[in-house]
Image (spheres, rainbow, N blue to C red):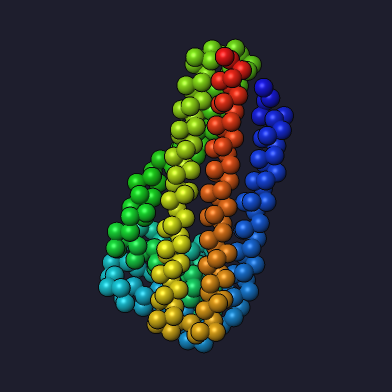
Amino acid sequence: MFAFGFDPLYIALTLVGLPLMFLPQMWVKRTYNVFKNQPARAGLTGAQVAQQMLSNNGITNVKVEETLGELSDHYSPAEHVVRLSPDNYRGTSIAAATIAAHEVGHAIQHAKGYWPVVLRGQLAPAFGLSSQLGPLVFTAALMLNLFMGLSPDLAIPLAVIGITLFGLSVVFHLVTLPVEIDASARAMVALKAHHYLTTQELPGAKKVLTAAAMTYVSVALYSLLQLSYYVMRLSQLQRSNE
């Protein structure tokens, strides 16, 4: 059995994972920069689009605020706040309207009790711990067995605990996909129905949302690859100690 640093399978996972993680980030930034510089004909700022969408959906307890950074836009369900980065809060571009509409899409999900959002919220408290602790526990089990002779009777259950913990974070990433896709769908409906963007501008909005969605898809895929790797290594551990 190989140590992680010299495991060909782990190296292959890394080689696949690096472009899988970074290329979508480059894509979304490039797409955003293109449409950030294309003014929308309606002339509304992202903040105005967000406020109108909230009002149109009868949501009165959510504020719209400006936040620092680029592409730092998000909806905080705990604080009932849609936060938009300066370019999107003040800007009147296609990208500003699109991203504002997407974030309000999340606020609408929470207001309507969209079940994937509810499930994601339940998983969120354990996500950070499970995504970090799971791989550490799994690695410790394999290293202790390999280098310190830890009994398989102890190493295997410890590895299973690590995989289970990491599996929670994988579920979180998978649940995030329908949440993001649904928020984008709600955004596109609003952008068209309320004429925040013209028919000619809507394809640009779709490009922005598609690029953003791919970042979540890539994270979910990479987490599945990691989980598959851990399961294969557990299988190797079980076979080598039979």
Q: Is residue 91 visible?
A: no
Q: Nearer the viewer, residue 193 or 125?
A: 193
Q: Compared to 233, does 215 lie above or below?
A: below
Task: Say whether residue 53 is left or right of residue 1.
Answer: left
- Displayed quadrant of residue 149: top right
Q: Residue at x 51, y 21 (%)?
A: 156
- Residue 160 at x, y = what percent? 48, 27
* Quarter of the figure with residue 135: top right
Q: Is residue 13 left or right of residue 167?
A: right
| Location of residue 141 in the rendering, given as x and y in whole percent from the top left corner | 55, 22
Measured as percent of width and height from the top left, residue 52 is found at 36, 78
Question: 102 and 82: which one is in front?
Answer: 102
Count of marks placed on residues: 0
Q: Kindly identify the residue that appears in the image at 49 percent across and 16 percent down.
A: 154
For residue 53, side relative to residue 19 (left or right): left
Instruction: Please tell me which residue is depicted at 70% across the width and 37% down the height of the picture.
Output: 11
- Check the picture and name the quadrant holding the C terminus: top right
Residue 81 occupies quadrant: bottom left
Q: Is residue 210 above or below residue 38?
A: above
- Is the N terminus in the top left, top right, bottom left or bottom right quadrant? top right
